[in-house]
Structures are given as C-alpha cells and as structure tokens.
Image (cartoon, rainbow, N blue to C red):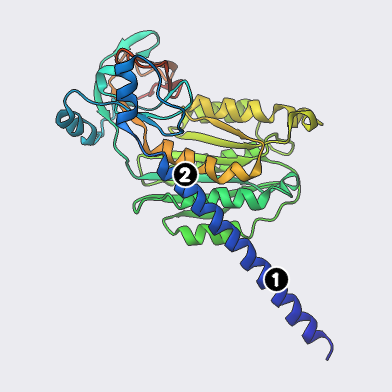
Amino acid sequence: MRRRPVRSACFFLGSIAALIVAVIALQVSARAQQNAEQNAANPADIAKAAAAGAGVGDTAKPTGLASKDSKASDKDHQRPIQMDVNMVLVNVTVTDSMNRLVTGLEKEHFQIFEEKEEQKIIQFSAEDVPLSMGVVFDASGSMGNKINRARMAAMQFFKTANPADEFCLVDFNDSPRLLSDFTGDVDEMQNKLNFSQPHGRTALLDAIYLSLNQMRHAKNQKKAILILSDGGDNHSRYTENEIKNMVKEADVQIYAIGIFEPFASRGRTPEELSGPSLLTDVAETTGGRQFPVDNLSELPDVAGKIALELRNQYVIGYRPTNPTRDGRWRKIQVRLKPPRGLPPLHAYARTGYYAPTQ
C-alpha cells in the first residue's frame, strides 16, 4: 500500500522536469530562429561595399550582390537544375572574410576545374531546393553534461524544415542505431531525440557509415548529414580511411558541430586529440564544414547558421571534358571571379568525385 504515493510522486516530478526542459528548448529555439531570420541576405550591404571598395559592416548578416540585370538574374536563379547522367553537380557555399554568407553571385563569377582543366558551366542555380538530411547524434558517455544543449541544437535545425524536406536520425554510443527512417514529421524526430541518453563509448565512424548507407534511400536530389559530437572515436569497426573513402563516393555534404572541451583540458587520449581534425577532414572533403563550439549556449545558433547555409548555396553543373569512364578519382576546384571592389571571398565545395565505370 505504501508504493503508490511514491510512484505518483516520481511520475509528477518527472513530468515537471520534462516540462522545464521543453520550455527551455522552446525559448532557446525561438532565440536561434530569430537570429537565423536576421541573417537573411541583404543585397544593399555588399552593393554599398562594392561601391566604396571595402568590406561590409560588422553585422552577422550574409552579404548579397546587386545585379546589373535583376530580372535576368532572377530567371537564371529560379531555373531548376535538370537531371543529366553525364553531368557533374557541385554545391558551392561562398563566404566573405568575416565568414558571412555571400548571395547574389551570377554564373560568370564562378570557374570550375577538373584535374586543373577548366570546365564549361552549363547549369547554374541558387534556389532553395528540397533537402534530405541525416542527423548523427552523439549519445556516448562523454556527452553527459552536453546532451540537453545538443538536443536543442538538433531541434532548432528541424524547425528550419521546408514542407518537402525529409530527415532521418542516427544516434550512437557503443554502436550506432537508426532511430528514425526518413520522415517529414519533425515532431517525431524530436520525440526520438528525447530517448537518447548518454552512456558507453564512441562509435562515431560506424555511425557515419550507417547514415551514409541510409542516405541511399533519400528521395531528394540534395543530400546532407549533420553530425553533433564531441569528436574522437574509440569503438568503431570501420577505420578512418575506410570512412573517408566512402565519403568521397557518396554525393552527400557533411556538416559537423564539434562540441569540444576547452583546449587546456582536451586530449586525454589520442582519440580525443584527433576528434576536431577527424570531423574537419570528413566535412571539408564533401564541401561541408566543421563548426567548433566551446560555449554550449551557442549550439542552437550554430545549428541555425548551418541550416541557413544549406538554403543559400549555389549549384554548378558541367559535363566533364574527359568522357573516359575509368572509375578514377578526379579532383575538383572552384574558383571565384567576384565583381571589382569586393572583399576576398572563399568558396567551399567538394574536392572531387569518382568517374563512372560504365
């Protein structure tokens, strides 16, 4: 007879705790969403900078370019990329010297090279297209005091979804688990995340392998993976080289949020020391980026920034001048030819692709 009050009290306290976490998540998500909306492209800023021959102000907004022929530009940007089995498509992110997104560039502002030979750009687009996104969530023991903020970051990313987007969810500790197949139900994804509890070791490479396999079932042409982890790997069957080769073969952009300890307290093991470089190497090979985070309160804002970046990419299409189907790795390089007077710009794109074999 004495057990019922104890159960009821535990249930009541558990409900209150869950409600508090949900309220905090909503508040942080609302703030991050507001920040992301403030990051909308502002063509006037960079147009003024171009006229003055200097950079844009110190705001965190992405910069946009004023077009000489805005109607022609709008038509070109809204023209959908057509499917062509012989065409190579490359997603490109452009930032300025202050790491702000640059929008409004035209086809003539880009050059693309394959094995150092310039290719003719025959397709160009800057529209926001439907996205298939895989989220890889670290639930290892080292995430103990970070996991609630990491959940909020993932939830903030889900809140940026468009109606045609879809998501899948993989979490990992001693081994990876597919928590959710592709779905457009954001609420389902959030509910699945609440069941991830930190324990065990870190099988990060195995989780990347599982997520890349899952991306083969994606319905949208544009595919990306977001990794939330404190880096390192100490329990995977797959090696770093195997995963890097698999990443090269997959037409998937990878972004990573590295939730690292302060440098002075980092590096107790070789795996922890290699964590930041591992995430960076994997992401940049695909044209994505790794965003290191020391302050946990910044996690939702960083997730919103990545979502904004994925919505403001250029897509370049070309048919290789080398038609040989030899299955070899071909290096790609994207160069920029920005209008005069702009500050230095940087392009992020995948580093290459494997030629078809038949």
Where residue 166 is drawn, which disc sits there? Answer: none
Mark 1: amino acid: Gly
Q: Position of residue 27 (x, y in %)?
A: 55, 57
Q: In the picture, residue 273 is in which quadrant?
A: top right
Q: Position of residue 124 (x, y in %)?
A: 26, 27
Give the quarter of the figure containing the C terminus.
Answer: top left
Q: Does residue 64 appear to the left or right of 159 in the view shown? A: left
CA–CA distance in space, label 2 to label 1: 32 Å
Mark 2: amino acid: Asn
Which SS class for mark 2? helix
The residue depicted at 48 percent of the width and 24 percent of the height is 98
The residue depicted at 77 percent of the width and 31 percent of the height is 266
Q: Position of residue 260 (x, y in %)?
A: 69, 36
Give the quarter of the figure containing the N terminus.
Answer: bottom right
Marks 2 and 1, the one that precedes in the sequence: 1
Relative vertical location of residue 24 with respect to residue 349 in this rendering, above or below:
below
Q: Which residue is mark 1?
A: 14
Q: Nearer the viewer, mark 2 or mark 1?
A: 2
Depth order, front residue of 115/95: 95
Q: Which residue is mark 2?
A: 35
Tell me whether the residue at label 2 lies in contact with that at label 1, contact meaning CB atoms closer than 8 angstroms: no
Relative vertical location of residue 341 with respect to residue 93 in this rendering, above or below:
above
